Image (cartoon, rainbow, N blue to C red):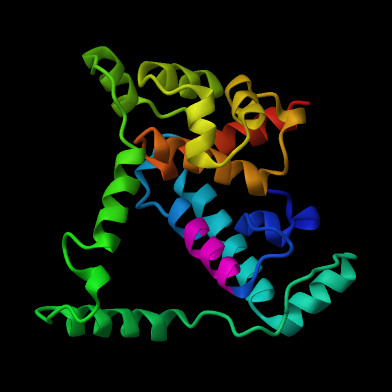
Amino acid sequence: MLPEKREKNYYEILEVSTNATPSEVYEGYIRAKNAYSQDSVALYSLMTKDECDNILLLIEEAYSIISDPNKRQQYDEARGISNRYNAFEAGPRPYQDQIANRSNVTATQGRSYNNEEEKPGSAGSITKIVANNKYQLDYSKDSEMEQFIEQNTEWTGEALRKIREYKKVSLERLSELTKVSRTYLACLETEEIDKLPAIVYIRGFVYTYAKCLKLNPDLVANSFILRLRKLKDTK
């Protein structure tokens, strides 16, 4: 569960670090909104609509403060938070950016390639192929395991370990793919909470862990973090 109103932390709600840039804050805001939207299949069996709505209100409240340089500075000062980012850096312009992105897509349709790296078969294209091959998994599919992956709604450390081993990915290789230390990955699987960093970082670890194993990263990360918070509450 998220912190109660009297002790809530806006950074934790958006799941970003206190040194997050305006762009990272915006990304955290969008990620959080998508995670707790009722359109998210991952939440159907985990939370009620009212619970999601309450969290969405907190997310909006958190973003209204953290996205505003003046309000964020006052918030940080009131809580003794010392940041190294530029509080007045220009943040993202979501609506303008969306329009610009659509224009770019339209402009590039049917055009000739002026940049050699963009052409199919070019060095840039080959680099992308090499990168994709790096994340390929070589394992024999098992119908029972595939069914478990498809139907599972509660993602635990044990479930992650089970699927990692099924897909024949060692902790060493997973560490190389995710850029997360082998120690942290092992602690995720054993759910050794005390040996893991702040939840802000854990969600990122789980997200990349799931992505590398070709799982639904949002579903897995949401479920795992909810479980982690419940485990912390019981301690």
Q: Main secondary structure of the magenta part?
A: helix
Residue 212 appears in view: yes
Q: Nearer the viewer, residue 130 or 43?
A: 130
Q: How many numbered discs? A: 0
Query: Residue at the location (48% across, 58% down)?
Result: 31
Q: Which residues are magenta?
A: 23-32
Q: Is residue 115 left or right of residue 24?
A: left
Q: Residue drawn at (60%, 67%), measured in percent from left and top?
A: 25
Against 103, residue 157 (above or below) is: above
Q: Determine the residue positioned at 48% across, 42% down.
A: 208
Quadrant in the picture for residue 91: bottom right
- Position in image of residue 127 (x %, y %): 31, 54
Where 49 falls versus 159 (above or below)? below
Quadrant of the image for the C terminus? top right
Asked where in the image residue 197 lies, by quadrant, the reply is top right
Q: Left or right: where does residue 200 sit relative to residue 57?
A: right
